[in-house]
Image (tube, rainbow, N blue to C red):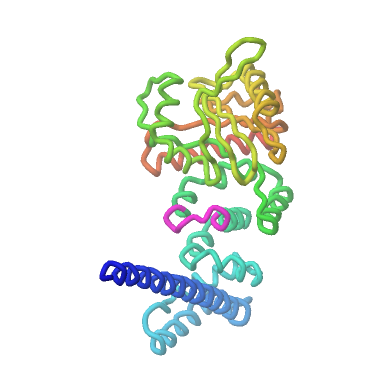
């Protein structure tokens, strides 16, 4: 009997704890939604009804006075810098309906990171990807610092097309490959030396698979290494095979340690056709290939029109660099990519 009482007591405690935790979660979410919407409304009120068309020094005087009044009434948390955040919040998210939807999944801390990125497209990108992939604030900050938006293909597209893809993501939760794949990939966590072989790169990725999956992005699932394919009685082996849950496609990854070569396209096409014939389920899309190279050959990639196929080419950075140097290198890469797009 004592054992039965103890067991029932444990069950009772577990059930009550679950009720409390669920209630706390609901309350926390409700408070976050309420606070975020109020911050947006404050920013709108100040921007539209007070600062609109006024001189900068006059606006600063109003904000300073308002900050002092609010602090006297409500205590800490209403300094001038905070009010400037609210104004910026309204400026970057002028549509209340979008804020209402996002605030159910993003905290005010998320919004504070997003509103200071460079462009409206980047704001929309980080907000939607944060919602879809459920990034915490630390991960969001890391994504922004690593210039994730600039490294995705969508940032290189004409603005109208980019906005259309982001709208589809916002309204239908539908990811496109251009939102998933990036270039370059930062693989400095692999700990590789200056000189290494393809097998070393593959093994390092498998040893740090969790880190590699984080760099690939949410939705990737690892399936196999050295995927064997028998074609015309001959063995072929694909380095890595993944599956992307949102895209519902197999993703074949081929690792190369040198520059991209035109012959890699034919090899990847063979892998993709085999996977389509032998591994793809009826409800899945066509497999996608990702050729990871130490360097790209821009003209060859352009002439092969790989951006119009299911084959992506991505460069990777394995050398550890301090944040400032890494950011500089990424800026140089992005600038070169944009110049290439302009010259098409």
- Give the quadrant of the N terminus: bottom left
- Is residue 21 within the magenta segment? no
Q: Residue at x 69, y 49 (%)?
A: 162
All told, the count of numbered labels is 0
Residue 264 drawn above or below residue 128: above
Q: Residue at x 62, y 82 (%)?
A: 49
Whether 237 is drawn above or below 55: the answer is above
Q: Main secondary structure of the magenta part?
A: helix
Toward which corner of the image does residue 182 lie, by quadrant? top right
Spot the residue most to the left.
2
- The percent coordinates of residue 196 (x first, y second) are 40, 20
Task: Determine if the magenta segment contains residue 135.
Answer: yes
- Residue 12 image point, x, y percent: 37, 72
Q: For the magenta stretch, what is the residue range? A: 130-139
Q: Tell me residue 306's x, y (percent).
A: 68, 28
From the viewer's perspective, is 290 left or right of 317?
right
- Judge by depth and name the residue closer to the eye, 117 or 101: 101
Q: Nearer the viewer, residue 86 or 30?
A: 30
Q: Is residue 62 above or below residue 179?
A: below
Residue 21 image-quadrant placement: bottom left
Which residue is pictured at 61% across the width and 19% down the height?
264
Quick one: which residue is furthest to the bottom in this view?
Answer: 73
């Amino acid at each position: 009997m004592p054992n039965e009482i103890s067991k029932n007591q444990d069950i009772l405690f577990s059930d009550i704890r679950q009720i409390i935790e669920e209630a706390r979660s609901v309350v926390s979410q409700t408070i976050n939604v309420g606070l975020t919407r109020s911050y947006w409304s404050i920013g709108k009120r100040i921007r539209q009804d007070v600062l609109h068309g006024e001189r900068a020094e006059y606006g600063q005087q109003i904000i300073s006075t308002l900050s002092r009044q609010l602090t006297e009434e409500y205590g800490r948390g209403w300094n001038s810098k905070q009010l400037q955040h609210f104004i910026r919040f309204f400026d970057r998210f002028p549509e209340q309906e979008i804020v209402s939807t996002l605030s159910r999944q993003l905290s005010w801390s998320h919004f504070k990171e997003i509103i200071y990125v460079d462009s409206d497209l980047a704001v929309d990108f980080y907000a939607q990807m944060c919602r879809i992939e459920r990034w915490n604030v630390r991960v969001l900050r890391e994504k922004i610092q690593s210039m994730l938006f600039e490294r995705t293909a969508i940032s290189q597209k004409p603005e109208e097309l980019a906005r259309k893809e982001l709208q589809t993501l916002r309204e239908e939760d539908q990811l496109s490959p251009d939102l998933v794949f990036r270039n370059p990939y930062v693989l400095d966590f692999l700990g590789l030396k200056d000189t290494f072989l393809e097998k070393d790169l593959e093994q390092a990725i498998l040893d740090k698979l969790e880190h590699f999956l984080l760099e690939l992005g949410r939705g990737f699932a690892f399936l196999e290494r050295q995927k064997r394919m028998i074609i015309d009685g001959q063995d072929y082996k694909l380095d890595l095979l993944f599956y992307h849950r949102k895209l519902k496609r197999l993703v074949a990854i081929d690792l190369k340690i040198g520059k991209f070569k035109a012959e890699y396209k034919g090899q990847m096409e063979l892998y993709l056709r085999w996977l389509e014939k032998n591994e793809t389920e009826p409800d899945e899309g066509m497999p996608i290939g990702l050729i990871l190279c130490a360097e790209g050959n821009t003209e060859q990639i352009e002439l092969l029109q790989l951006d119009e196929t299911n084959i992506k080419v991505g460069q990777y950075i394995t050398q550890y660099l301090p944040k400032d140097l890494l950011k500089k290198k990424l800026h140089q890469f992005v600038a070169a990519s944009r110049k290439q797009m302009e010259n098409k």
